[in-house]
Amino acid sequence: MTTIKAKHVSKNCPLKNVFLHTSKLNLSQSQHDGLIIIEFELPWRRAQVRDSCEVAVKKLIIAECVMVMNRFKLLVTWMLLVGGLIRAIAALPTTEELLPEDTLAVASIRDWDQTWLASTNSAFSQFWADAAMKPFRNHFEARLAATMQLPLEKELGIQWADYQDILRGQVTLAILPSSAPALRAFDWILIIDSKDKSDHLKAVLDGLRKKWAVNGQQVKTEMIRGCEFSHLTFPQNKIFELVQKLVLGEAGITSEETSKSPDTFQCAIGQAQSLLLIGNSSQCLEMVITRLNRLEPKTLAHNSAFKIAQAKSLRTAQAYVLLLSQPLYTMAMKYFANDKNETLPGLKADKLMASSGLAGLQALSFKWETTPEGKLWEVFAAVPQNVRDGLMGLFLPQSKDASPISIIPQNAVTFHRFRWEGQKVWNGVENLIGNIDPGLVAMIQLAIITAGKDTDLNFDFKKNLIERLGDDLIIYQNVPQFLNPISPQVASQTVLIGSTNSTLLLGAIRASLSILPEPYCNAPVVERTYLGRKIYTMNLQTPLDEAGAKLDFQNLHAAAINGYVVFSGDAASVEEALRNNETPVKSLRDSPGMAQAARSIGGFNTGIFGYENIVEKTRRDFESLRKDPSTFEEVMFGFPVPILESGPGKGWQNLFNFSLLPPFDQVSKYFHIEVNSLSTTPEGLSYKSFRPIPPQVKK
């Protein structure tokens, strides 16, 4: 009896039939433990036939195994291809697949539903929904509806609720090269994906067309690639009036020149599959529709600058803004080349542009995303390493430790550290100014040659000061000791400049005061000793006020510690730095959550690192706004914003009632810290900012 065992042999294996036709054999087949067992008897007197049959059986079994495996592979391949084809047909192209390769700029929310869900679960959303915020929130929402939502619905003849359901997928605004340069500078298109609400979108558009017809609105209909689009025309002055009403309130006034302007605003609106498309030209609408139907292979996804930004930053973005810089730079250079006016006396705009280093900038992107640990923002500049000239290559950090040093206390509200080589930066600034205006750099060099000569004829500004600069610059600010309702920014910043010999560097800085303009060059310097080290105080005279009276003197204090020269407008901060230099304290670096947050932005060794205590910052802003609402622009933007000029009953004062804000301690749990860093790679520069989820907030 001869027995052969084999796996993966089908039950319909034709071996039995083959043997019955080749010889008279007693053949049986069974299955045991997943094996196919074939047993047959051969006459021993016919040994040669027996051996030949055994070989034939083995070959047939192997052939059958190969055949079955090939069929299995073919089935799997077919299933994958069909599944992929179904997904490709069902899924709409992404933003970069819808837009043309020569797109100038794009702002996109990749998926509205997902982004909205992430935002509603955020710490800020929980803060806004807190019961303590209810009086302020109710007032704001009521005024927003009364002053903006309802007037907008009345002017446009629409209901906002009708349009909420169409916001489902991507929301994208793109700027494209003009299809009619003689008429407009650029084309634009707005893309909104309604996903499975395409029937609702169609009903909304049909309703709008009926309203336009009833109201006598002139509408031109055009078919683009089988899709119906309505062309609308609005007087620009009506749009300006509406915007002013929304921003400044009912008291908004349109200038006489604007009110008489004959210019018009034109756009086309229509639907392609589940997409709502609005644009200012038929050509840009057609370009998107052809890519929607996958009839045009050249898309933004094939743009080399986009590929870099996508690979290095945008791949995980939930929302982003992208500028394709090369075409924009070319347009700017053409504009400045035709501009005969100088931007500054003796300075040409084209020279300023050339020295900026923007010629090497291929793309600039901003992204936002949520992670399980918090929120991340990133600005990425696609500037290859070999073309970083001008400003783009001047202030690049060394890849060194930029974490808080031991003397920075844990109560610091802000902290920033820059690992710049002082001498290299100085030389770079001189070369940059020389490329822009050789005469200006000559004046600077003449001034520094004479610096310090009034006290020491052998003083050499570059040798005694510049060459003693190290590769470290630190700026931090402690918690304010009190809040001033007139000016909440009361805490002075402390600056540390690294040096190979801080004592000699401080002496060189003091000797160079004569280089400063009046009245600072003649400011008196007072010297005193604290903990065995000298503190120099310079009285900085301030200008006269409007009445002609002298304002209070401001002081600048300076001292040398190990490896740094310390400067501050607050004497207590300099003294604290001297004490911390002598006696170790709890450092900011050891604050809870600091190291973990730093890992989300690349760690401490990027060369530039920053920190901000959002709890204390928001506390200061809360108290400032509750005491004096007029500080709103200063709190929000850091400076007055002309478009937000407001008075009682209009503008932002009509929206916010800051007296309804709760005491900050009732909502402080929703705020934590923020860290940021700047790092370099061969492909570009990356600035990241990260806010971890506050420990007391539900994830």
Image (spheres, rainbow, N blue to C red):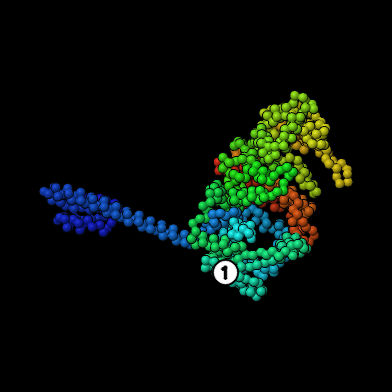
**Residue 447 picture quarter:** top right
Q: Which residue is mark 1?
A: 222
Question: Where is 327 relative to 213, above or below?
Answer: above
* Residue at (52, 53) in percent of width and height: 301
Give the residue type at disc 1. Glu
Looking at the image, which is closer to me, 464 or 659?
A: 464
Q: Residue furthest bottom?
A: 214
* Residue at (62, 74) in percent of width and height: 210
Residue 351 image point, x, y percent: 67, 43
Give the structural element (helix, strand or loop) at label 1.
strand
Residue 650 image point, x, y percent: 77, 61
Residue 74 image point, x, y percent: 35, 56
Instruction: Please give left or right for residue 239 compared with residue 25 in the image.
Output: right
* Residue at (62, 71) in percent of width and height: 219
**Residue 400 picture quarter:** top right
Can residue 562 be seen here?
Answer: no
Question: Where is 306 relative to 158, above or below?
Answer: above
Can residue 78 be seen here?
Answer: yes
Residue 540 image point, x, y percent: 81, 37
